[in-house]
Image (cartoon, grey):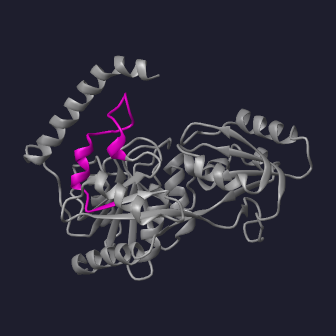
Amino acid sequence: MEFLKLFLLPLAFIYGLIIRVRNKLFDWKLISSEFFTVPVISVGNLTVGGTGKTPHVEYITRLLSKEYKVATLSRGYGRETSGFKIACDEDQARTIGDEPMQFYNKFPGISVAVDSNRRRGIKNILKLKPETDVVILDDAFQHRFVKPGLSILLSDYHKLFFHDYLLPVGTLREHRKGSRRADLIIITKTPEVLSPFERRRIIEGIKPLHNQKVLFSYIRYRELKSLWKPDEPFNLSNHYGMILLVAGIANAYPLEFRLRDHCNELITMRFDDHHKYTRTDLERIKQNYSDLYTRNKLLVTTEKDAMRMLEPSLRDLAAQLPIYYIPIQIDFHGNDKHTFDQTIKDYVKENKREH
């Protein structure tokens, strides 16, 4: 594998050169970034793959939505529609994307919009929802046509960006120095117990600028929920013989680690990130679940995957399966929670516009 990477180095060099030129054009203002009077918070990363953007966007939404009119703006990856769209009751994951669908279901009081052109998306939000107090951009760190008022960069604890390399050798979308554009750098998916030594080691590796704050978050798993009876409590602490996990996300390892504590054997059916499930997929899942040689078994998926399984064309097949999903939230270590919350609140309060 390492030998193969040597052959990819020229491609990484060319890719990196293109990205450097693009970023310099923005830095030198030869390509303009638009600044909006409404507070705009960007959440993104330097790498391809999952770093926990969705639960962090949800955390910010939960933090602000009781006091402010919040709008989220995502690309809507994997949707079958195009252009700008604000979510409504008729939408499904295929029309707005699985993550926006999750936002819409969880936060009925906010505006959920999708548009690959974030500048156009913000303008349309403010036109259709002029009462909007703050816009949260999901996965927009490289979308430099918009100048966010507060930029949050996420990096997976298990794949820190300063140890990574540019595509296609590594997973970096741009050079590590791109991290300098961030106001907050959050190391995600850390262990629930993080030593001061480990924290210091990572901060030294990042070498943050004087104006940057480095914070550390971890995943909190909520109670398992039935896709069909979400109001009925379910205790995962009961021991299971076998669990079949269906995961169409970039990094399933934290969830696998969690589930292994509650079963004798964990079997994972892996699909690509944002995978569009078909009837054939559900038939395979049904067969694999039936083939588990015990009555003491459980079928678990992620919240994002559950949204995609609710598509009208799949619902009759999905209804034949005892599907459970596990919601997640993020939390911060020690004083980082206060620092993060206060930074977000202060930014919105100081920049809130008058309607």
Report if residue 148 is visible in the image: yes
Residue name at image x 42 percent, y 69 percent: 60
Q: Quadrant of the C terminus?
A: bottom left
Quarter assignment of residue 244: top right
Report if residue 43 is visible in the image: no
Residue name at image x 26 percent, y 75 percent: 347
Q: Which residues are magenta?
A: 161-185
Quarter assignment of residue 273: top right
Above-or-below relation of 30 to 184: above
Q: Indicate the position of residue 147 as horizontal and vertical percent values.
A: 21, 57
In the rendered structure, the answer to whether residue 166 lies left or right of residue 351 reads right
Is residue 233 shown in magenta? no
Is residue 176 shown in magenta? yes
Looking at the image, how many numbered discs can be counted on the residues? 0
Quarter assignment of residue 268: top right
Above-or-below relation of 354 to 129: below
Q: Indicate the position of residue 312 as horizontal and vertical percent values.
A: 68, 48
In the rendered structure, the answer to whether residue 61 lies left or right of residue 275 reads left
